[in-house]
Image (cartoon, grey):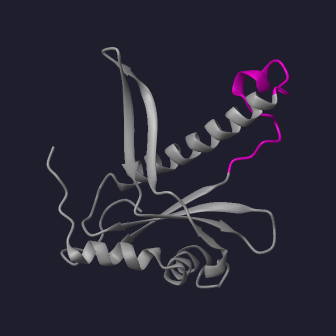
Amino acid sequence: MKGIVLTAMDDEIYEVLSDNEIFADLFNGALFGGNQIIRPDMLEQENEKKVMRVGKEGGRRVILRRIRDVQKLSGLRESCLAVVLAAEGQRNVHYAMPVRCMLYDAMDYTRQVERMVKKRREEGKLEKGAEYLSGMKREDRLLPVITIVFYYGEEQSWDGPL
């Protein structure tokens, strides 16, 4: 497997995307037509490292590891609604980008489910049937995960999936 070489430009993009004001502007522009719905003070840094056990192969556990570029938790307005927001900086067109983003998102949802199941099992208040099987109660909710890709390539226009 060939290694990915990051340039100073990549590093600078990741640093810029980590700034709460720029991150909020990026999402407000992409999702809300420029309306200032997400404010910088609503954003909290999330762990970008993803680790998930995906099974066993030859008697050894198989671990999937991925690192997102930037991920933040956002509370919307004064409501109790929260959402996980992630931005992927991309210098080159990546034709499988939607699949890559879905994998990151699935890992985030899996982590939420695992935490919820652990909590519910520790409480010991799951009913038989669907609650016991899933480890979750009917009223449990997962935080939505929204990923956008920030393309900053100069070699060609983005002609991959949107």
Q: Residue extending furthest top?
A: 59
Q: Position of residue 143 (x, y in %)?
A: 67, 53
Q: Nearer the viewer, residue 160 or 11?
A: 11
Quick check: 99 above or below 57?
below
Residue at image location 19% in from the left, 57% down from the top? 4
Residue at image location 59% in from the left, 81% down from the top? 33
Q: What quarter of the picture does the C terminus occupy?
A: bottom left
Image quarter of residue 29: bottom right
Quick check: 30 above or below 106?
below
Image quarter of residue 82: bottom right
Q: Residue extending furthest front?
A: 122
| 128 magenta-colored | yes
Q: Is residue 95 left or right of residue 39?
A: left
Q: Nearer the viewer, residue 113 or 130?
A: 113
Q: Main secondary structure of the magenta part?
A: loop
Q: Tell me if I can see residue 153 in this picture.
A: no
Q: Position of residue 123 (x, y in %)?
A: 81, 31
Residue at image location 24% in from the left, 66% down from the top? 92
Q: Is residue 42 left or right of residue 153?
A: right
Q: What quarter of the picture does the N terminus occupy?
A: top left
From which residue to which does the magenta span run? 124-142
